[in-house]
Image: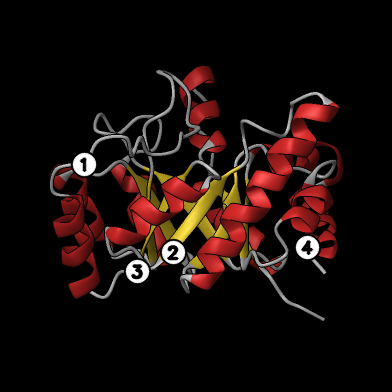
Amino acid sequence: MRSRALVLELDALPSLREATAARDVDVPAAATLAELAGVDAVRLGVNGDRKPVREEDLLDARRTARRLELRMRPSEVLMSVALEIRPDRVLLAADGQEGRAASLPLDLRGAAPGLSALVRTLGDAGIPVSALVQPDLDAVKRIHAEGVSGVELYTGALVDLPGAERSVALVGLGDAARLAAKLRLNLALGGGIGFRNLRELLEAAPAADRIAVGRAALTRAVLVGLDQSLRDLRALLT
């Protein structure tokens, strides 16, 4: 039976703190509970303005979590944060809409200046680099050329498509996943993944090594608790 890694994005908790001025949002405690429930890594995203995730969130999570992933846009300023925090993996992504923690795939239509150098610097520091990209062949080829060790195919744009369109998009996802596997890239899926669509996505891209979840897991946790929510998701991965 194949084992896939489960990654939990915790950005929704700092977002809640920002929106409600809550003082009792405990990111390190959530990371510990997630790992006890079987999560293989937790992920936080950092922006240039350090909102909603603060630098102290990253430091606290680094001290607490066995495996911490840092999501960031390609930037020398943010690279210095990564070199200080020393995450177990960096995921390069575009910033989402203002006021939202969610990220978007990198725009690879033009060569990102310094991207290869950034990937090389992090690699020399022993930090593997993945990139969040659109699930198409061209995006996988382009980001592979930049020297990353992994790719996360963005599923957020296809999960809510109507039936016929989603079927076509799932075929494209499978093609991109097969190419990533052929190129020996660590392959993840991320974006809008939850209980209702996880199996469908895995059937389309069975080569995926890692699955990144976020809001769906934390929303379900309000009803059944974080431990049960994550154990239910873990069960769907087998």
Callout 2 secondary element: strand
Q: Closer to the observer: label 3 or label 4?
A: 3
Q: Are marks 3 and 2 in contact (CB under 8 Å)?
A: yes
Which amino acid, by three-letter code, is at mark 1? Answer: Ala
Mark 3–mark 4 distance (CA, rounded to whole Å): 24 Å
Which mark sits nearer the N-terminus, 3 or 1? 1
Identify the residue position indicated by label 2 in the image: 150
Q: Which mark is residue 153?
A: none
Can you say which quadrant of the picture contains the C terminus?
A: bottom right
Q: Is residue 62 above or below residue 77?
A: below
Res 7 seen here: no
Foreground: 140 or 100? 140
Mark 1–mark 4 distance (CA, rounded to whole Å): 36 Å
Badge 2 crowding class, 10 Å Cα cut-off, few under 14, some 14 to 19, many 20 or more, is many
Identify the residue position indicated by label 3 in the image: 128
Q: Is residue 176 above or below residue 195?
A: below
Mark 3–mark 1 distance (CA, rounded to whole Å): 19 Å
Foreground: 224 or 67? 67
Badge 3 crowding class, 10 Å Cα cut-off, few under 14, some 14 to 19, many 20 or more, is some
Q: Are marks 1 and 2 in contact (CB under 8 Å)?
A: no
Task: Identify the residue at image location x=66%, y=37%.
Answer: 192
Mark 1–mark 2 distance (CA, rounded to whole Å): 17 Å
Which amino acid, by three-letter code, is at mark 3? Answer: Pro
Q: Is residue 103 above or below residue 65?
A: above
Q: Is residue 116 above or below residue 109?
A: below
Which mark sits nearer the N-terminus, 3 or 2? 3
Quadrant hosting residue 124:
bottom left
* Left or right position of 106 against 146: right
Q: Which mark is residue 112?
A: 1
Task: Identify the residue at image location x=23%, y=60%.
Answer: 119
Identify the residue position indicated by label 4 in the image: 234
Callout 4 secondary element: helix
